[in-house]
Amino acid sequence: MKLIQGIEAFQNSIQPDMQDRFSQLESGQSPETLFITCSDSRISPNLLTQTQPGEIFVIRNAGNIVPKPGTGELAIEATIQYAVQVLKVRHIVVCGHAKCGAVGGLLDLDSLTGFPAIHEYVSKSKQVLDVVANCDEDTKLDEAIKANVMLQLENLQFYDYVKSAMDAGELELHGWVYHFGSGRVDYLTDQSTMA
C-alpha cells in the first residue's frame, strides 16, 4: 500500500531531519491561519502555502463550505471556534479551487438526485446560483467558484466570535481560488495585510 510506504519513508528520512520541529510541537500549537479548503485530492494545503507542521490549522470539506452557525455542522463550528477563541488565529483563508466538483454539482442539482446527502450539502451554497444566473456557460463554473468563496466569507461573519475578533482588529478574512493546473492563486480579497 502506497500510504504505508509513505509512512516508512517519512519515519526513515523526514522525521529525523525535522525532529527538533516535532519536539517543539509536542508542547502545543500556535498556527497563525485557519485554512478552509475543499477535500479535493488535488489540493495540498501545506504544499500550496509552503508551510510546515504547526503553521496552519485546516478544515477540509466538499466545496470548502462554511455553514451558518446553528445548522448542525458541529465539526465545522467547533473547529472554527477552537481556531478563533483558543488558538487565536490572525487569519482565516477560504480557498476554493478550479474545476470544483461540489460547485459543479450545485450548478446542476438535478444531477445529484441519486446522491441525497451531496444534494443537501451543496445546497447550503444555493445563494451562489443567484449570483451566476446571468453568466454564460463558458464562465459560469469559474464565477460560481469565486461566488462560493465569497459566500463562505460572509457566513463566517455570522459567528459572533469571528465578528468580534474582526471588529477588534485581531482577525482578517481572505478569499482565494487555486488553479492546480497552473499553480496560480486568485486573491479575491485584499492580501496586503496578510503577513
Image (cartoon, grey):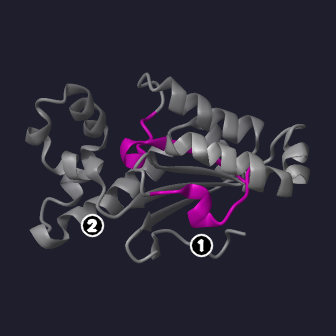
SS for dot 2: helix
Where residue 84 appears, as percent x and y from the top left, is: 69, 41
The dot on residue 2 is none
Left or right, 168 with respect to 111, comes to right
Check the image and report above or below for 103 versus 87. Answer: below
- Disc 2: which residue: 142
Q: Is residue 53 above or below residue 177?
A: above
For mark 1, does the 10 Å Cα neighbourhood hold few (<14), some (14 to 19), or many (20 or more) residues?
few
Q: Label 1 belongs to which residue?
A: 191
Which quadrant of the rendered structure holds the C terminus? bottom right
Mark 2 and mark 1 in contact? Answer it, CB < 8 Å.
no
Rendered residue at 21%/34% (across/down): 119
Q: Quadrant of residue 96?
A: bottom left
| Picture coordinates of residue 151, whole percent (x, y) | 38, 51
* Kind of element beneath mark 1: loop
Image x and y of residue 42, in percent: 42, 57
58 is within the stretch colored magenta: yes
Separation (CA) of disc 2 from disc 1: 21 Å
Q: Is residue 131 above or below residue 186?
A: above
Amino acid on which disc 2 is placed: Asp
Q: Mark 2: few, some, or many residues within 10 Å (few <14, many ≥20)?
A: many
Q: Which residues are magenta?
A: 43-68
